[in-house]
Image (tube, grey):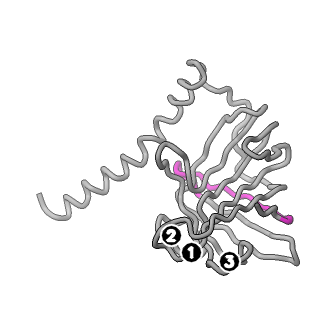
Amino acid sequence: MTTDTRHENLHAMKTLRFLLPLLLLPALFAACSGGNSPVQRETAAIDTVFTQARIRSYGRYYKGLELKVVSLDLYSEGLRPQPDSTHNSGTSLRFSDLFIDTTDTRLPEAMYVIDSVPALHSALPALYFDGQLTGACLLQVIDGQLQQINTFSEGSFSLRYEGDTAVMDFRLVSAASRTYHGVYRGVPAYD
């Protein structure tokens, strides 16, 4: 077997290892709902206007990485964030790992790019770590129940400020190669 063939096989195995949990996700939802798959009365919107944003700082979370980690959660109209839950119906866009400079006191103006390698002004793609979904994902909630998860493997978003008002424009690509666009304009809450 040549070196090129080994690299191709290794790449295929890594891709399969990443995609397999995503392919099994519908079966897991069915198992969790007592054998009944969730009712999809509404699909996740391609274009979403977010009305609320929450940013949390975790400081220098990763050992050996000289960057501050923050999370960004955005909520559409009709979805109200609570301390550890969401109520009603709507869409939530989540970035669990955004990387900024350790001296930044707020999420700085920049173009943030989804990348599997942590770097300044990057966001991690969606992945499962210790059984938990992390990275960039879109959650569709109907009547307080999670109905759909879209994970993002590439894309970017811009952030600029007009006074205290943050203006964000999201252009993301799902693991299923579906393009997603969302916008936010408002004053984010910082935790």
Which residues, given as a range, are shown in magenta?
Answer: 173-187
Q: Which residue is mark 2?
A: 118
Judged from the image, the secondary structure of the residue bearing numbered disc 3 is: strand
Mark 1 neighbour density, 10 Å: few (under 14) some (14–19) many (20 or more): many
| Front tag of 2 and 3 | 2
Q: Which one is earlier in the sequence, the residue at label 2 or at label 3?
A: 3
Residue at left 72%, top 46%? 45
| Mark 1 vs mark 3: in front | 1
Residue 67, label in figure: 1
Q: Is residue 175 above or below residue 170?
A: above
Quarter of the image where the N terminus is located: bottom left
Q: Which residue is mark 3?
A: 110
Crowding at mark 2 (Cα within 10 Å: few <14, some 14-19, many 20+): some
Q: As displayed, is residue 124 above or below residue 158? A: above
- For marks 2 and 3, give the CA distance: 15 Å
Tell which tag, 1 or 2, sits nearer the viewer.
1
Mark 1 touching mark 2, by CB under 8 A? yes
**Kind of residue indicated by mark 1:** Leu
In front of the other: 1 or 136? 136
Query: Whole-percent x and y of residue 24?
Result: 46, 35
Image point 80% across, 69% down: which residue?
A: 167
Residue drawn at the location 70% of the way across and 71% of the way down: 158
